[in-house]
Image (tube, grey):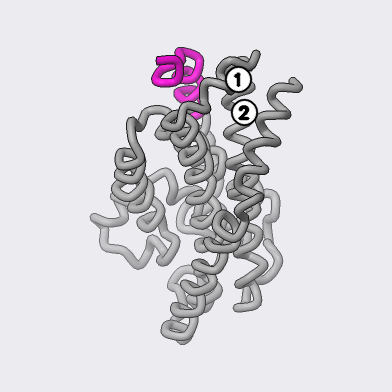
Amino acid sequence: MIGFITLLHKEILRFWKVMFQTLFAPILSALLFQLVFFHTLSDRVVSGFNIPYGTFLIPGLAMMSAIQNAYANSASSLIQARLNGSIVFILLAPFSALEFFLAYLLSSAIRGILVGLGVIAAISWFGLSWPSHPIFALSFCLLGCILLGALGILTGILSKSFDQLSAFQNFFIMPLTFLSGTFYSLQSLPTFWQMITYANPLFYTIDGFRYGFFGYADVSPWISLGVVSLSTILSCFICLYVIHKGYRLKS
């Protein structure tokens, strides 16, 4: 238990000491997105939600920023430790695979939640009110950060170089987050793109998080909760299995 707490503390300090890069920069990016879209599309009303587009956008931006940073935290930490050789000192310590996994996962979730809260605090004055279903909002934020934190651990272990990690982030994670309904309602899409969106698990995290604020969403929040929960459990199980086997960690 002491080892787990020490590793978790070390991982939290790792992003906390460079908070201008890891916390404030993504909050500023979300604020700029909000400023641009709010002033150019302020007269639009989102069909199905009956709210101004500027208000509709806020939960999506917060959730997108949170999950992107949860992913970046574990992925960057692990590949740096592997490529510079410092992972040896962690592996020599008497950690179980579960403790190793939980320390990286929780630190990623904490960074993601801090960024999400920061984005909400920075842009909620554009018209966002208190969540109508706060338990749903909190649950989707937590599950989304855990899901992406686990994917970050997996890619941080499986990537052989920063180039491979960057390719996975730019050609897989980023398209998934931008095509997840952050900037639009599913009802505004043609049928083909609706089907594509339904296959994207990140869509359910953002749609469910948005339900927590407005009380309505493109799909049932219970369906979203089921999809996100199953995706999270599956990702965590695969991640824990890879760590237990020591694949690319002990070789």
Closer to the camera in the image, 113 or 144: 113
Dots 2 and 1: beta carbons under 8 Å? yes
Instruction: Please state which amino acid type lies under the numbered disc 2.
Output: Leu
Q: Is residue 244 above or below residue 119?
A: above
- Describe the element under mark 2 as helix, strand or loop: helix
How far separated are the C-alphas under marks 2 and 1?
6 Å
Q: Please state which amino acid type lies under the numbered disc 1.
A: Leu
* Residue placed under numbered mark 1 in the picture: 98
Q: Is residue 91 above or below residue 109?
A: above
Residue 196 visible (yes or no):
yes
Q: Please report the residue visible at 35 percent of the width from the left and 40 percent of the height from the top.
A: 162
Q: Magenta stretch? A: 235-251
The residue furthest right is: 2
Residue 123: image location, x then y, percent: 60, 72
Residue 196 vertical placement versus 41 (above, below): above
Q: Residues within 10 Å of mark 1 (few under 14, many from 20)?
A: few
Horizontal side of residue 189 vs 69, given as left or right = left
Q: Residue at x 53, y 35 (%)?
A: 229
Residue 136 visible in the displayed image = no
**In the figure, residue 201 lies in which quadrant?**
top left
Compare residues 168 and 197 and report the one nearer the observer: 168
Per the rendering, the mark at residue 102 is 2
Picture residue at 34% right of the left edge, 45% below the top:
166
Tell me if residue 68 comes above or below residue 122 in the rendering: above
Q: Which residue is depicted at the point 53% across and 61% down?
A: 26
Q: Quadrant of the rendered structure where residue 182 is?
A: bottom left
